[in-house]
Amino acid sequence: MNRLIIIGNGFDLAHGLKTSFYHFIEDYLNKAIISFYDSETHTYNDPLLEIKLTNNIKISDKDKMARLLNPFNEMDKLNNSHHVQIKFKSKFFKIIYNKVTTIKWVDIEIEYFKLLVEANNVKTNKIKHIINLNSSFKFLKDKLITYLEKQESEYNKEAINTYNEYFTEIINVKQLYKVKQNEDNLRNGVSIHNLLFLNFNYTNIIENYLPKCNVDGSSTIKYIHGNLNGDKGEPVFGFGDELDEDYKTFEKENIKELYQNIKSFDYLQNNNYHSMINFLDEDNFQVQIFGHSCGLSDRTMLNEIFEHDNCKSIKIFYYEDDKGDNDFTEKTYEISKHFTDKKMLRKVVVPFKQSKPMPQIKKD
């Protein structure tokens, strides 16, 4: 029996990194507002956003101090000012901004795909609409990579010492080459031979755990979406649900720009995906999920994993807050969307009572 461990953004968040899209947009806006206040002309301008004075009033020191406050509140303040004009130059970014400010969460890749479908359905200047959307998406992707590089370089490495014991215990490293009875309600005599960490993050936090998990070279990490410096594969950022009905309409079009940010084509640029398939085909395997939302933007890959004949169980290590509330049920909703065979879903997903919360680094 092998074990596939899926690592998502919640894993980085559990280590105290600010790697959610909310954190990223917050940082982007903060830099834009600082630039607006600090520039001599009091303007900020990039492909997504423009902030400028509409008259020659003087910016006071008190106003400048606002740049240190909540950037979302400051954007509202500036937007309601008679002296400042805020222009969202990208429909894509405006949608993201509105969702982040109202629900504090947004799946950028799904919003991109919705607008891509919309652009493909326009009657005139279709290719122009698609190119403009792709340009906005690329700008945001490049900004995100730069932001994550800073997060990766600055996180508290002492947190690893706290988390290491919990993590290596929770994935049952001691099972490697050893027999454990009745694991996850599977057959008696389960022996975990190999671990594959399927890292959906661009960051390298998971690397800290490989030494303790690597029994006789039994553990490997695959950066399925690439990593920040590209040596494990260029960052893959886009949409990955080829089962979507709207996606199927793209194949009737002779427009290459439609595929520019479809993940499947990026997977062909390196051997990460093929290595994963070889692992799935090699032997029966269990799946453990740490911090992955299991959203539709990765549906093609997750369907291939979850409905594989060798997949014997899926165990969710859910998020639990200080009040004891958890996201286990919501995770099962998302996981169900990747199954065409609902009987198999009920068969392989490990029940809540046999699941565990994912450890969280306590913040001071």
Image (cartoon, rainbow, N blue to C red):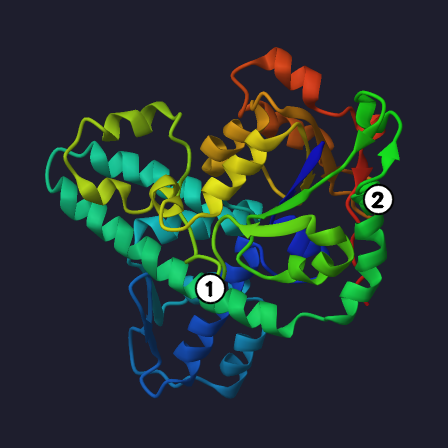
Residue identified by numbered label 2: 323
Q: Name the residue under label 1.
A: 231
In the rendered view of the protein, which quadrant contains the C terminus? bottom right
Residue located 56% across and 53% down the image: 201
Answer whether residue 15 is visible to the viewer in this image.
no
Mark 2 is surrounded, within 10 Å at the Cα level, by few (under 14), some (14 to 19) or many (20 or more) other residues, namely few
x and y percent of residue 72 in the render?
52, 61
Distance Cα–Cα, label 1 vs label 2: 41 Å
Tag shown at residue 251 = none
Residue at the image position 37 percent from the left and 51 percent from the top: 94
Determine whether the residue tagged by mark 1 lies in a helix, strand or loop: loop
Mark 1 Cα-neighbour bin, 10 Å: few <14, some 14–19, many ≥20 = few
59 or 117, which is in the foreground? Answer: 117
Task: Kindly state the secondary structure of the residue where label 2 is placed.
Answer: loop
Task: Identify which residue, 272 or 79, lies in the foreground.
Answer: 272
The kind of residue on which mark 2 rests is: Lys
